[in-house]
Amino acid sequence: MRRLFSVPTPNPESLVRSILLIVLLAGWVQAIDLTVNTDFAINEDTPLVFSYGELLAKCTITSGPSVEFKISGLSGDGAVFIASSATGPWDVVPTVNVTLFTSGQFIRFVPNLNIQGNNVRIIDIRARTGAGVESTSQPVNVDIAPINDLITATSGIFVQPASPKVTEDTRYTFTWQQLKDTLGISEPDSQAWTITLTGVVSGKLYTTTDVLIDTFPATLTFTALGDNALRWQADLDAYTKPGAETTAGIGAFTAKAVNTTGSPDESAVVTFKTPVVGVTDVIAGATTMTILVPLILTQGEINDFTYEELHALIHGSNDVDRIGVLYLDLNTPGVAGCTVTVFDTAGTPVQSGTTPLGFTASLLDGYSLHITVPDALASGMHVAGISTLRILASTADSNPATAYFDVRPATGGSAGGSSSDSGGGGCGAGGGVMGILIVCCGLGLRRRRSAR
């Protein structure tokens, strides 16, 4: 029997293509169309946190439905984190083309410092159907509004260049770069700035053309970082002790950094310090150390004097400004019975004896001198011996000056009754003259009570 009808045999390859086409047409999600090109908005240096729902609401999906987003790109203008809570923890960084952003999740975008402007990319996303069909990749952007960052400055110590260096009794020129580096001036928004001088700490300030600056505040005119900005000269004979250049700079002036464009603002007032290289003066013979102000001592007490205190008692010279060795020959019988001890920088006794001494007490920088006066030593002025100063860089000594002890009773009034405590009396040649010196100098140095 003949067949009246024939059924064509389907091509398997064509059948597969047809099925795939039907599936794609049923589940295809078109490219995401964000409602605005810059869909989020934040201020400069402010993190942004948004949910899956917030992002979905900003997207127009022409086919779908979309049930999740795949993160297909990350911002180069900040850090991106994903979490299941709006408060984090923010320790998971999405993996491009792997991490899915779904309902109940949150993304945190931390823009790079000081970045601002429109259309800053946060992430790229693809919409996905439940069957895993994806749209083309689209960016999620944010507008970042600029916020003025305050200019800042901090107190600092100038780092001496190899040459030239800030030197004793010499006027020095600082560049704008040196001022900026020393004071740590920072203008985060890269706006124009300058420096306003608010006062002098020591020495004198000058313009780059050597005009004295003595009225404050005084605003300098910024030119370029490599240009000269300001000149300064320390007080006469001021210098920094060797080894203390980075920790004990001499205070030069106070200033503040000022923004001159955009939103005006200024930093706090800060202090500019600098080390000063010392220049050894020459001992001037008889003009040096004509007077050593009397040492005020109290009966029955340990009287302490630092090297700095003793060095400050030297008068009658215009060139003794260097650290040197101070020699005290306390060998006069009139001050018998005083215990004298010299301590080094570690507090270790290196010389000790009872007056009149059979040795010369030698004090270096950082040393201290302890003198204990017995109750039996009468109050008043006593010639104790002589003192000389030798500059360390010189082989010459100053002319000697008489060393005096001005003994005071522990409780006021006279002890032993032989001398007045007013400075008008005294012993020997020192009485009248040294009384005047005491009134003029009014010296009071620290003491500590000994156990008796």
Image (cartoon, rainbow, N blue to C red):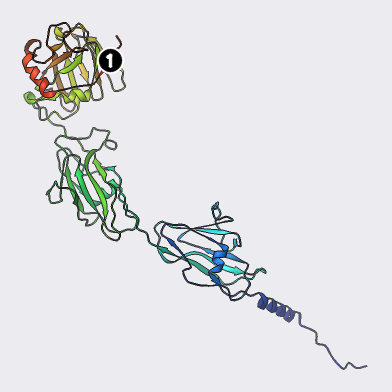
Residue 140 placement, left or right of 12? left
Residue at 15%, 34% (x, y): give it: 237
Counting every numbered tag in the picture gives 1
Examine the rendered structure and indicate whether residue 344 appears above or below residue 231. Answer: above
User: Which residue is nearer to you in this view: 205 or 14?
Assistant: 205
Q: Quadrant of residue 431?
A: top left
Q: Quadrant of the N terminus?
A: bottom right
Callout 1 environment at 10 Å: few (<14), some (14 to 19), or many (20+)? few
Percent x, y of residue 55: 54, 66
Examine the rendering and report whether any part of residue 419 can be seen. Answer: yes
Judged left or right of residue 50, residue 208 is left
373 versus 138 height, above or below: above
Q: Is residue 186 left or right of 384 when viewed as pictured?
A: right
If the image is split into quadrants, where does the C terminus sit? Answer: top left
- Report the front residue among 237 and 6: 237
Q: Secondary structure at mark 1?
A: strand
**Residue at the disc numbered 1:** 449
Residue 71 in view here: no
Position in image of residue 436 (x %, y %): 8, 20
Query: Horizontal and vertical percent for residue 370?
Result: 24, 16
Which residue does the image show at 13% across and 15% down from the upper left? 404
- Residue 101's image quarter? bottom right
Identified by mark 1, the residue type is: Arg
- Could you tell me which residue is drawn at 15 percent across and 14 percent down? 405
x, y percentage for residue 75?
Answer: 49, 62
